[in-house]
Amino acid sequence: MAGEKMGGLQSDGEEYSVIGDEADVVHIDYQDDPSVLDVDVSNEGPVVISCPFPTVEGKPRSIVAGETAVDVITVTNTTDDPIDLWAVKIYTSTPSESFALSLTEPPSDKSDEATLSFFFETMSLEDRVLQGGQTIQIWLSCKPKDIGLHTCIIHFDAGNKMIERVVVLLADDKLSQLLAPSRPYNRGPRRRAAFNTDKFVRGVPVPEKRGTQGSKRGVRGSKYGLPEFPIPEEVKRLVENKQLPDILFQQLSSENYVTFFTTLLNIEELHIKDAMREHDMHGVGMEKIDIEFLTLDVPGLAEKRPSLICGDYVFAKRRAEDDTQPYEGIIHRVEAEKVFLKFAKEFHRGHREGSLYDVSFTYNRLNMRRLYQAVESANNLGNSTLFPPDTSRRRLNKATPLAPFTEDLNEEQASAINMILKCRGSPPYIIYGPPGTGKTITLVEAILQVCATRRGARILVCASSNCAADHILMKIAPYVKANDIFRLNAYTRPYEDVPFDVLSYSCVDDSVFRCPPLGELSRYKIIVSTYMSASSLFAMGMRKGHFSHIMLDEAGQASEPETLIPVSNLSDRETVVVLAGDPLQLGPIVHSREAETYGLGKSFLERLSDCEIYSRNDRNFMTKLVRNYRCHPSILELPSRLFYNKELIACKEEEDDISIHDWPDLPNKEFPVVFYGIQGCDEREGNNPSWFNRIEVSKVVKIVQNLKDCAKVLDEDIGVISPYRQQVLKLKKVFETMELSDIKVGSVEQFQGQEKQIIIISTVRSTVKYDAFDQKHHLGFLCNPKRFNVAITRARSLLIIVGNPHVICKDVHWNQLLGHCTEHDSYQGCPLPQPDVAQYEEEYQDENEYNASEGYTHPCANEACGGGNVEYEDLPKPVTDEAEWSDGWK
């Protein structure tokens, strides 16, 4: 592995062997190296050498940092003839000088001084002769000073053969030991329901309550019902046979638009349905709660595995009744890992303590049907909205002095608002907002200016998440009469999760959110909603063109069909549609790899950005915000270069509330980006497929403690990002134990749109073995440039990365960040990768530099919009929130 044997003659003519100088082997991937996990000593020759510190169930043996770990190596001559053992040498060790050899057993740390003074250890042993049948013992000791992987390569030069032993140990501290897997990982077999659910006995739905509560009155009921939109049998057959419909290989156009996106949604729905069945359970019990409910314990529900909400349903069947139809149980309440179900009355009457059931999970198709309906309605939009031609009517780009409502506006923000005020109908206007450039502030100011200057203006504001919608509402509220604003919430939204200030703008009936009748809805000047909930407005009978403006925030995070819910149902030729977002940050969450690849993973915003009238940065149709008010210039430098053509301008002002310069562990006081290289261990436990790295957890906790002790940082100033749910849960558990619950811990998706003074990123991965798996299932940080972009732009004052440089350097963007820190003397920790690896990645980066002005191209991109077919490998990988969806699903 690490060196070659060289031979020669001694002065007396006898042969001798020399091992070369110590090599620079800085990383051993124990998961993917047969010299560690699969050593066959029987085929090595007449000298048999034992393996010190053998791995346990494929993982390194755990030792304690600060203590000495010892194991004995036996060297046996299996022949009757003497054999020369020319040398035994530690060829390399990482960290250096952490391993030693001795011919006597090392004394304990508590031994007296006399015993310690006679003990001798070394990096190499002198040559000797092994007599026939003789066995000698050599002790190998490891003295870890810090946590992390400790590796060692030992060479045994015996006779005419060189034999190698590779040792990998994991040094733990008290905290990392406590986080070790409680149970071995065992995903178990795929669980499939043993019964058909095409026919079933319906359950009891969530009651439709009427009445008033709170400041806004409301009733349920809709004018237009949603069709069922069944999936065509032909599409089902093709997907089951792992084939794709021909429509997906056509260029997207106005003629095939509806069929194209409907087919993508079919594929996505079939994938979700199949994934839900992974959680089917057999032979489980239920508990009767008073006379109304049966409760079912669902392991993993707290982690959204599966993701179930009020209104969803399951199918259940008693094990002893194979010939009967299954019963549908509708979820009325979700608590931790327990769901409260209502079945038909006879099912409840027949329940007995100890009864066992087979349970099949499914999902509520309501949102998917909303998407189908929106795509179908897109037929009425016309090319000026869906495929804006280069001949689109120009707008007068004459600046008008503005009197801002919220705060001072920069040149680009004022220009965007002026253009929105001048817009009359399609094509859509885009506010391109890279991280920290004030995109939401610009959108809020545009809403307020429209209200103030356009008589009769009616504005629908949509965001991709409830949190983002609430945020916009509270930014607008101080400047608009309370009776002019309505916050439309889904009836499934938990009442207790809604901020108190938002409730006064909502319609609530007995702690359940409702939609008011059409007459009341029509009176509001501003309605704030999520994309999905906006379908309720169409269902209630609101006509196209009622809204003069439809403002879509976070448009880069919504799929094109999701964006169409408000646009295709509620806009006409005169409606001004504004999309605000960044196509280079996280895109839509799509669960089917095929659906994502062929277009569902590309937002409407991103597809439009490829059109000629937008890609040339014509301010008549798009304004790009370039002044970043969030990040320290050193934090902003790399993403600006990699993604935004070096256009971003750092405008962050010095703040008095936090001073990172006082932190003694900051290597470069002028460069607040630190990379801590640490070689840990990828682990899983129980039936949870998500990864965690307890060594990195311990390192993150030490960094947090140091920041709090030495730099007087507040808990709420710190955010910790990790791509794997299990790592997030381990960190949360530790911080709760330490009473540091104000430290936000989450996935990249949970941090998008947010910021913290200090961001610590734990990358988790410490082996390249599962890189292919991660890439296939779109997990982790690697090969996700959008996820990388979001992760490194959340910090205002200090960015800290904890990870294994030998793994993350395989990704061109992370390797750039690693080099960025190294160049500024801001790397600490384990030895860096070999220069030739870094050089290879730099060359690869040069060849594959991401051109932010061109963006990525999907097969679905319209030819007139600068699109075209590309190979699958050239496409960006789907961005899926691992914190929401299992990285074991396929």
Image (spheres, grey):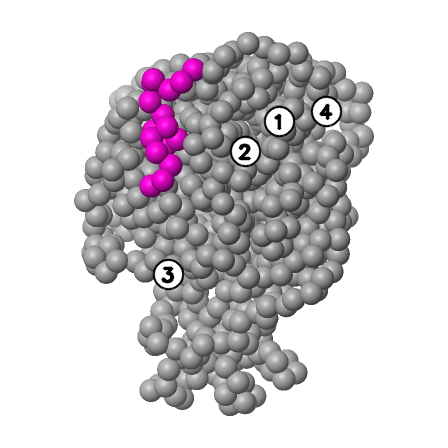
Which residue is disc 4 drawn over? 406
Of 185 and 502, which appears nearest the observer? 502
Q: Residues within 10 Å of mark 1 (few under 14, many from 20)?
A: few
Residue 714 in the image: x percent, y percent?
78, 34
Query: Mark 2 near mark 1, Cβ–Cβ under 8 Å?
Result: yes
Q: CA distance from mark 4 to mark 2?
A: 22 Å
Q: CA distance from mark 4 to mark 1?
A: 18 Å
Q: Is residue 99 left or right of residue 163?
A: right
Which residue is disc 2 drawn over? 548
Q: Quadrant of residue 561?
A: top left
- Residue 589, numbered label: none
Sequence-wise first label, 4 or 2: 4
In the displayed structure, 412 sits above or below 287; it is above
Of 562 and 32, which appears nearest the observer? 562
Which residue is disc 1 drawn over? 454
Which residue is disc 3 drawn over? 228
Q: CA distance from mark 2 to mark 1?
A: 9 Å
Q: Residues within 10 Å of mark 3 (few under 14, many from 20)?
A: few
For the N terminus, the image quarter is top left
Q: Is residue 132 left or right of residue 655?
A: left
Sequence-wise first label, 2 or 1: 1
Q: Secondary structure at mark 3?
A: loop
Sequence-wise first label, 4 or 1: 4
Query: Mark 4 near mark 2, Cβ–Cβ under 8 Å?
Result: no
Q: Residues within 10 Å of mark 4 (few under 14, many from 20)?
A: some
